[in-house]
Each structure stands twice: as C-alpha cells, then as structure tokens.
Image (cartoon, rainbow, N blue to C red):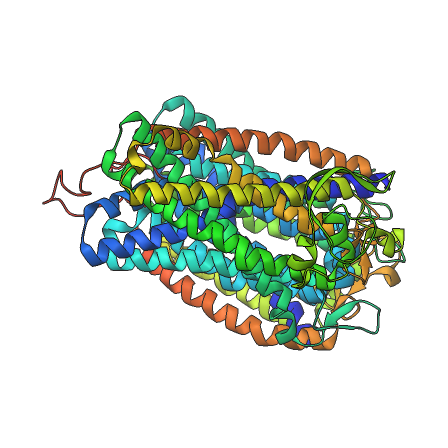
Amino acid sequence: MDETLFWNRIQFAFTIVFHYLFPQLTMGLAWFLVYWKWRALRVGDEKYNQAVRFWGKIFGLNFAVGVVTGIPMEFQFGTNWAGFSKYAGGVIGQTLAMEGMFAFFLESAFIGVLIFGERRLGPRLHFVAALAVAVGSWTSAYFIIVTNAFMQHPVGYQLEADRSLGIASLGAYLLNPWAWVQFAHNQTAALVTGSFVVAALGAFYTLRGLHPMQARLYLRGGTLMGLIASLLAAFPTGDQQAKMVGKHQPVTLAAMEGRFVGGPMAGEAVIGQPNVAARRLDNPIEVPGALSFLAYGHFGTFVHGLEDFPKDQWPDNIELLYYSFHLMVTLGTIFILLMGYATFQRWRGRLESTNWLLWVLMLSLPFPYIANTLGWMTAELGRQPWLIYGLFRTSEGYSKVVSSGDTVFTLIGFVGLYLVLGLLFLGLVGREISHGPAEEALSAKHPEEPHEELSP
Amino acid sequence: MIPTWYGITAFMLIVYIALDGRNFGAGMLHWLVARTPEERRQVIAAIGPLWTWHEVWLVGFGGTVLTVFPKLLASAFAGYYLALFLILWCLILRGISLEVGGHINDRMWQGFWDFVFVVASALLAILFGAAAGNMARGVPLASDGTFSMAFFTDFTTRGYVGLLDWYTVSVALFAAVALAAHGGTYLTLKTEGAVHDRSARYSRVLWASVAPLMLVISVESGIVRPDLLGHATHNPLWWLGLIVICAAAIALGSGLATRNEMRSFVASNLILGAMLATGAAAIFPVALHSTLAPENSLTAYYVAAGPKSLAYAAIWWPIGFAFAAAYFVFVSRRYAGKVNVSRENQGFY
C-alpha cells in the first residue's frame, strides 16, 4: 500500500474508533434516561429521578468528549480525503450537513437543559429535554449511516459533467435499503453498550453493598434491556446485514468467512485462521451448510469464494476482516447467553445474590465496546479496496497535496491528545461512580428556598 | 443559485464566528476580568452551557460547504492542513477545559483548566484571524486547483506565500483585538459585580482600538490586493455591509456611553458580521484567490456541485435553518439575563 494512503487510513481509523466509543454510550444511555424520566413522571417514585441525575453527569461527560472528538471527523473529509470530497461531496455532504442542521442543533440546545435544568424547568420539560437529546442522537446516527451506506452500496446518484458525483434522487439516497438495515443493527448494538454499562455499574454497587435501591434499578434495567438488545442485534438486524453483504458485496462475504474456494453447501467456520498466502483456512471447524443458509436462506445455495473474483477486488486485509467479523459474532453470542442467564436468575429472584454472575456482569463492561468496534471494522475493512463500492477506490480518495510527514505529525498529535482525553474521562467518571447516586430528594434539604440553579 | 449559496455559506461562517467569537474573547479576557475563583466561575458560567451549540454552526458550515462547493472544501481543507488541525486541537482543548474545569472544586485543578481555556481561546482567535487574512490575500493555487502551503515562507504576500506573512499576522492580531472586544461586551451583558465592571472597562478600551486598527487593515488589504477595491465597489452588498458597519459603530458607541449593554452587544455582533460580510462580498465570485496566477483562482461557479445537488440542498437547508432559528429563540430565552453562580451548587460550570 502507498505509504501516504496507509497513514491517512490509520489516522481516520484511530480517530473514528476513539470517537465512536462515546456516541455509542450516548445513544444507548439516552433511552434509559428517557425511560426513567417517564417512570418518574408516571409513578412519581424519586428513585427514578435520582437515577437520571446520577447518569446525567456521566452522560454529560460522555457527550462532551463525543462532541470534541466528532468535529475532527467531519473536517478530515476535506483535510485527508480531498479526492473523495471532490468526487462525492455533492452527495455525502448532504447528509453531513443535515446531521448538523437537524440533529446536532437539537441535541446541543437541550443537553444543557437535561443536565442542569431540572429545577428551573420542572419535571415535564426535563423529560422533553431527555427525549430531545435521545431523538437528536439517533437522528444524527441515521444521517451518518446513510453516508456510510452510500459508500457501501451507492444509490440515488448521477455522474455530473465534471465526472464527480451528484444527487439524482435525494429520496433514494436517504432511503437506501442498506442504510435501514445498518441503522437497525448499529442502534441495537449501541443499546447493548448502554445496557451493559448500566448493568455493570449496578453489579459493582451490589457487590460492594452500596446504594442498594439504585443498584437494583440499574442491574434489572440493564440486564433486561441487554437481553432484548443483544437478541435484536443478532436477529433480525445482524442476520439481515449479513444477507445484505452477501447480496451486494459477495467478495466481502467470502473474505469475512475466509472462504477461498466457492461451492454449494457452504460451511460456516467457527474456528480457523485464514492463510491468505496458501489461500486456505487453517485448522477449520465448520458447521456444514450454515453459511449458505445464513447468507441466502437455503443450505444448498452456492456461495462464492475469493478465487471467483479478480484479486484487485479482494479486501486488502483479509485476516483482520475475518477476525473482526468472527470475534464480533462470538461476542454477540456470549452477550445473549450472559444476559439471558441474568434475566433467568432475576425471574428466580436470585440476580442480586448470584455473586459470580455479578462479577461477570461487572467485568464484561469493555466487551460491547469491543464488539461495536469490531462491527465497524468489518464494515469498513470489508468495503476495501473501494471507498465507494464499485465506483471509487480508496487509493484515489486521499489528499495528494498532503505529505505523509504532515499526516504522521497530526496522527501523533491525535494519539497524544486522545490519550489525555481518555484518561481524563475515565478519571472523572470514576470519581462520579465513587461518589455514587445521591439517595435523597433533590430539594429535601431546603424545601422553602427558591429554586436556584448554577448554570444561567 | 450559486451567489445565494455563496451567501448562505458565508452567513453560516459569520454566525459561527459571532457566536463562538464571544467565547474566544471571553477566554482571552478571562484572567484580566476575573481574579478570584468565584469570579472565574462567573465567566465560565456565562459561556459554559452553550459552547456545543455554538460549535454546531461550524459543523453545519463544513457540511454545507462540502455539499454545495465540494471542490472548494477539498482544495482549501487539504491546503490548510496543519492550520486546520491546530484549530481542531484548540477547539478540543477549549471544550474540554470548559467541561471538566468545574468538576473538581480545587484551586490547582481549576487553575490548570483556566490556563488551558485562556491559551486555547487566544490561539483560536489568532488562527481564525490568520485564516481570514489568507482568504483575502489568496493562497498559492496551482493550475489544477490545489495548493499546499508552509506555515511561513519569506513573509511577503506574493507568489509562494505561507500561512503567516506580515499581512495575515496583522489580520490575526486585529481579529484577536476585535474578538476580545466582542467577548468583553458579552461579559458586560452577562455578569455582575467586579467582573462586570472590569469587562465594561476592557471592552471600551478594546473597541476604541478596533477603530484605528480597522483602518490600518483596510489600507493593508488595499496594498496586498489592489484589485479588490475596484471590484468591490460594483457589489451593492459590499456597500450595504459598509453602511451596517457604520450604523452598528454608532449604536455601539451610544450603547457603551449610555451603558445599554444589550444594544452594545447586538451592535458588536453586527460589526463583526458586517466586517466579514464585506470581505466575502469583496472577493465574490472568487472563493479562493491564487497568488500565483489569477486564472488559477477558484470561483464559486467552478467549485459548485451539480445543479440537482444544489436544488435538493435548497429544499432541506431552509427547513434545517428554521429549526435552528427556533432553537436559537429557545436557547436565548432559556439563558437570558445575568449568570447566577450559587455557591451551594458546586460543580458544573
């Protein structure tokens, strides 16, 4: 690979992976806040408000890091991927701008109200703020996924006089079938992250015997939502996503499976290491016919192997793609089993007393983040060598005027800055966790005082 | 269609500079107007809850330029590579300093984040100023519409120029003074007590120095781009901008003299906006001027996306803008009046 192209890809990969650690929690946690706020309004139980106040602080920190790491993403389309912007800006710019106009304005206008405005605005408007932030974050995700779906499966475009791409039908572009499937899969995966984080903290407090009321709420809400979201992430959304890849990117499906030779009754590898040089999967353990069934609905269907395609259309990092996909699927399966068992124990009334399960729930906190990242690595590595599938190669997309020295410099800058940001975030969230949720009413101390609030 | 889009994108950038410029200005004045930890929290509270809302205008601007002028964004962003990353890193540091500074009630912690806030704000004002200077002076665009620019070359304004030369540096310093004046006017409006009084004093001094500096910058611009003035006088919008600057200057003077803080602040926004608007009107239809050869310059017509892409953008942009305007009303009402820093509620902002 061209050295400059390599550094541009590494920088984008690093900044987007770091960035997406934060929005996935924002999008998952937002609906917990909405639900708790709604419960507080309906049943008037103060514990729900306490939960929103506590998680609101973590949400605010998480949101802020998401904002500051998100702005470089949009700018890198121009700075590092000028060839791509010049070629497809008329198309992909539409959704990037719409994200700002329709989603970010909404989110950022209400985030301050959500975190600081409870006293001044009262419970009803506070609920509206939670809802606005949740809707804003999911809308933003839709626009970004439409952009990515266009790169995976371009629709609704036309070739302009200057050989760049323009929009032929905005409706077709926005309603790309790939985007619907990808959105559903991605959003359920974000809910998985939110659920696991909420459950992990509930498990942590339960193990330490702290904040029992709140811990119970987090543990029960997190595991139930975790089960639902993990199931949905696998079926139907993950299943549909794989079928979409099989239909529109058969060479990607072959690479994801480490399948070099095509044939009917294709097996799904459970274990095995792709050996690209020898063009085979080493030490495979396969479920016969499973891939044919999963990708095309029949056990006998012919599934292409990589050798059925010219080599210049193969994804350029088959090993990493294979492991990303397989580890994601493995983790997703474990998530279903874990949350299923936790829900079963809750039904038996033993969730809070099964010590080993609480330990596992607590320690599983990083894994949904890993699974989300692996999912995106599958999508993005699988799209290679194309930047826009079938239309525009990644090697044409980067900024030719920027030297690799400049790119390495900015990459090092991002690594340093994000290391500090990450440590800062963990330290401050850890501090909030050790303070814990306040288990008393908001204005219990001075009920007669006017409701003053810190932020203006 | 294309002049309208040129106007819309310029408008979005102007709104961003007017909104976030007050934060840069407040940041530069932070140590001067606020001495005790309580006073510093007043400054932070005056801008704290809204910085993300302001930054969204920059995101909206970037996305809109990518949609309607993709070739401009590709050329300019890649060409300004290092400068843009410095801006991005400063934006990250500025946002984080606001967000985490209030989390721990500790002198050392808050002192450190105050420092980050001040330095990042000053650098942002200077970098955006230098960027404006570069837009006016032009960049070394080659015949293929791309350029790559060093931080500085020989500090002259012709040929293979760098990001910084005598002209862009003076525009950057002017921007720092003007934005500091803008921020001071905002803090006067939003704060009480000692911070208010010091802000009022600083903003009067700073605005008094903006007037002669503006004259200097205009003369310098005439030297660097002798072609601009003759071109600009044919554009009625340029004249309109001049009239707005004069009217806003009078309103500002009377606002400062009569201590009408709202009038001063509105006038301050108008002056900044109109200055940038006259600049945009003066260079139109050129979006990026070439210092190597005039025929290499990128015009708005050349860099525009296809007609259908523009037509679709013309459908959703006004809707999105209507939403943004509605949020603006909500946000302005929600955060209207002086900031109130109650001691009991330690922590956020």
Residue A183: horizontal and vertical position, in percent? 56, 59
Q: Is residue A21 left or right of residue A6?
A: left
Task: Work out which quarter of the rendered image holds the N terminus of chain B and state it.
Answer: bottom right
What is the count of numbered marks? 0
| Nearer to us in this view, B214 or B159 | B159
| Nearer to us in this view, A350 or B130 | A350
Residue at 77% of width from left, 43% of height from top? A318
Residue A319: horizontal and vertical position, in percent? 76, 40
Task: Work out which quarter of the rendered image holds the C terminus of chain B and state it.
Answer: top left
Residue at 51% of width from left, 28% of height from top? A423
Name of the residue lying farthest toward the top? B108
| Nearer to us in this view, A447 or A235 | A235
Residue A284: horizontal and vertical position, in percent? 73, 39
Q: Is residue A293 left or right of residue B182?
A: right
Residue at 24% of width from left, 52% of height from top? A120
Name of the residue lying farthest toward the left? A448
Q: Where B276 falls versus A395 (above or below)? A: below
Q: Where B280 falls versus B150 (above or below)? A: below
Residue at 77% of width from left, 71% of height from top? B301
| Nearer to us in this view, A279 or B253 | A279
Residue A212: horizontal and vertical position, in percent? 24, 34
Task: Answer yes or no: is residue A4 visible.
Answer: yes
Which quadrant of the figure has residue A58?
A: top left
Which quadrant of the figure has residue B262?
A: bottom left
Task: Answer yes or no: is residue B258 visible.
Answer: no
